[in-house]
Image: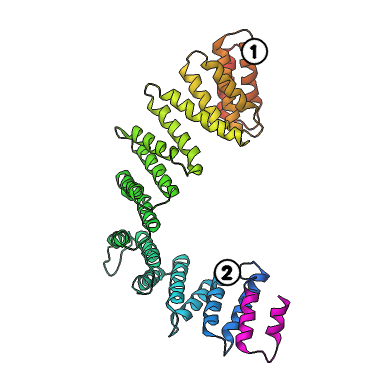
């Protein structure tokens, strides 16, 4: 840093040397906060104001200063950022890569500022990028995706030109999917965006996620996310056969070799499907899935109180031989965990007390009374659970 400053302070150092030194010093400040950010803006401004600084350094300094203005986020800084991006865009011989970056960033500023006319200005900038021959397929898809979002957010506006923003958004969506050289990941992003549109409904969402799942050359993590989303759509739609479709999707994730992050989620969601569906053998399948997750969590020394509670509920409701004892073991494990949420602890106490109340072994009523009393004495137990505990105590004659 001191060497760079020495060059900058030399009265007879050439401008290109000073610009390089300023740029090098700036690189350590531009991602900071407070004084560092101000120093970065000052260094960028010094490069911009040099009469003989190399053009590429001026462009990069304008980009850096504009990003610093955005990071500051104070009143008037949006406009300063847009002025710097505009200066790059209006340069006569600016390389296309810099012009594209400035256009995309200026469009983002317009959208975030949100003044009258800013949506259209953002659309215009995205349109310019889309039509630039030097823009890569990835950048064109990015611009199409962002322009589509602008159209979607304006879909219900009344346009003086009579534009159908919903149709314009649909046209951009189709353009992305029809682009032969667009990266598969970006096409998947566009499909996912459309699936998440509330107005499209479950059928359209399922179709979009299915298209992602069927795409070639996609990483397993993206396909796993689409399988998870499609399964959740099946669960929520609830048509005949949707439970099985959801189970199949969760099973597909579980059987993938390279998606450890989604494995536990898929197991828990599949167990939930089994519980709700209730076909022969489903409760045992749910128990098996919960048990797998519990063993995984305990192997990594992390708490499994939710999974234990859910497994205990199945034992409690199923009532096969030995199930009540298994339920008692799980509820007791949840109650004894140090960081269990208070509501979950109260629910486990209520369930365990209920088993003691109805099992009727020697000492069970005393155990039930202690559990119900513990809920009533908990300062952070929900009021409705305390009311249930008082009623259960009354039923016991206390």
Q: Residue 14: where, in percent of width, then height?
A: 63, 90
The label on residue 146 is none
**Where's the N terminus, which quadrant?**
bottom right
The secondary structure type at the circle numbered 2 is loop
**Where's the C terminus, which quadrant?**
top right
Which contiguous range is marked in magenta?
1-26
The label on residue 366 is 1
To which residue does mark 2 refer? 74
Q: Do the residues labelled 2 and 1 touch (CB within 8 Å)?
A: no
> Does residue 127 appear in this view?
yes
The majority secondary structure of the magenta stretch comes to: helix
Q: Residue 308: where, in percent of width, then height?
A: 55, 28
Q: Residue 351: where, in percent of width, then height?
A: 55, 21
Q: Which residue lies at the image location 48% right of the left edge and 27% below the top edge?
A: 288
The reply, left or right, for residue 233 in relation to residue 307 is left
Q: In this view, does 7 lie above or below 183?
A: below
- Which colour assignment does the render follow? rainbow
Q: Which of 388 and 243 is in front in this view?
A: 243
Q: Does the magenta stretch include residue 3?
A: yes
The reply, left or right, for residue 128 in relation to residue 79 is left
Q: Earlier in the sequence, mark 2 or mark 1?
A: 2
């Amino acid at each position: 840093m001191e060497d760079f400053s020495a060059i900058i302070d030399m009265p007879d150092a050439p401008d290109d040397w000073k610009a390089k030194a300023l740029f090098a010093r700036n690189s350590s400040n531009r991602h900071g906060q407070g004084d560092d950010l101000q120093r970065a803006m000052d260094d960028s401004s010094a490069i911009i104001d040099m009469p003989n600084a190399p053009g590429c350094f001026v462009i990069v300094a304008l980009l850096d200063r504009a990003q610093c203005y955005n990071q500051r986020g104070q009143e008037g800084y949006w406009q300063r950022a847009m002025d710097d991006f505009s200066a790059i865009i209006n340069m006569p011989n600016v390389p296309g890569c810099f012009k594209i970056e400035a256009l995309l960033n200026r469009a983002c500023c317009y959208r975030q500022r949100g003044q009258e006319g800013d949506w259209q200005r953002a659309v215009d900038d995205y349109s310019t990028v889309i039509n630039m021959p030097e823009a890569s397929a990835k950048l064109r898809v990015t611009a199409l995706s962002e322009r589509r979002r602008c159209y979607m957010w304006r879909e219900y506006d009344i346009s003086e030109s009579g534009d159908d923003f919903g149709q314009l958004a649909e046209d951009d969506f189709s353009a992305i999917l029809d682009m032969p050289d667009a990266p598969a990941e970006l096409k998947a992003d566009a499909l996912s965006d459309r699936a998440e549109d509330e107005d499209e409904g479950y059928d359209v969402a399922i179709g979009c996620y299915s298209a992602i799942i069927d795409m070639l050359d996609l990483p397993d993590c993206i396909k796993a996310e689409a399988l998870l989303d499609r399964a959740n759509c099946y669960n929520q739609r609830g048509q005949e056969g949707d439970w099985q479709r959801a189970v199949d999707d969760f099973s597909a994730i579980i059987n993938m070799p390279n998606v450890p992050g989604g494995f536990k989620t898929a197991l828990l969601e599949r167990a939930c499907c089994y519980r709700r569906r209730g076909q022969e053998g489903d409760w045992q399948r749910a128990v098996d899935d919960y048990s797998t997750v519990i063993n995984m969590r305990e192997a990594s020394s992390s708490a499994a109180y939710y999974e234990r509670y859910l497994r205990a509920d199945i034992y409690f409701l199923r009532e096969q031989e030995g199930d009540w004892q298994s339920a008692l073991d799980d509820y007791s494990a949840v109650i004894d965990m140090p960081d269990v949420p208070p509501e979950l602890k109260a629910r486990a106490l209520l369930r365990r007390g209920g088993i003691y109340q109805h099992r009727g072994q020697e000492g069970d009523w005393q155990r039930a009374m202690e559990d119900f009393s513990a809920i009533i004495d908990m300062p952070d137990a929900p009021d409705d659970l305390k009311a249930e505990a008082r009623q259960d105590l009354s039923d016991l004659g206390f």
